[in-house]
Image: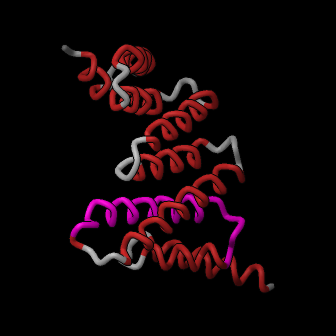
Amino acid sequence: LISIVNTLKADLLYNQSRAQTKKMELLQSAVNLQPNQPLFLAQLAEEEAKTSATIFLQLESLPETAKAVQDQLEKQALDHATQAANMNQHNINLLKSKARAEIYLSNIDPKYLKQALNTLLQASLLAPTDPKLLFNIGILYQNLEKPDLATKRFKKAVELKPNYQEATHKLKP
């Protein structure tokens, strides 16, 4: 019975977090109640990564203690994203969420772009016909200054979805 009540409370907190400014706090509460729920962990990781990147980009105008908070959020985001993805390694949405967290964190350190690319490449093995996934891999290759690999992914995305305007636009000189 306690487990059912905790699940209900966690679901309510998660749903409230989607429309609240205290999103990270509510997600943390949901994770505390249901620590084995990968969706909650993945969403928390994205919020931690987004907040960490935001703090990092504003460090010059913030007190010195902000750096410690930013570092902690960066570490938590990586831990939570990895933990969520590892709970179900065949869930493409969890891999996409992990990649989003890594992309946010690339504002702090470009090494996270390579990690995001590897995460999306892993997801593409599970969903090789997902044109949006291929498009996003192409974008990451562009950001990593690998235009030939980017073009290859954009072409494959258009091949799978001929009316994919964003991918078609990327192929134009």
The x and y percentages for residue 154 are 37, 20
Residue 160's quadrant in the figure? top left
Q: Residue at x 61, y 77 (%)?
A: 10
| Residue located farthest toward the front when viewing the structure as drawn | 64
Q: Is residue 41 magenta?
A: yes
- Seen in the image, is 8 located left or right of residue 26? right
The x and y percentages for residue 25 are 48, 79
Using the image, determine if residue 71 lies above or below residue 63: above
- Seen in the image, is 36 located left or right of residue 127? right
| Residue located farthest toward the left when viewing the structure as drawn | 173
Q: Residue at x 43, y 39 (%)?
A: 113
Residue 47's quadrant in the figure? bottom left
Q: Residue at x 72, y 65 (%)?
A: 36
Using the image, determine if residue 63 lies above or below residue 44: below
Front-most of 26 and 83?
83
Provide the major secondary structure of the magenta segment: helix
Question: How does the figure colour the protein chain or chains?
Answer: secondary structure
Using the image, determine if residue 110 lies above or below residue 104: above
First to last magenta residue range: 33-60
Quadrant where the image shows the C terminus = top left
Quadrant where the image shows the N terminus = bottom right
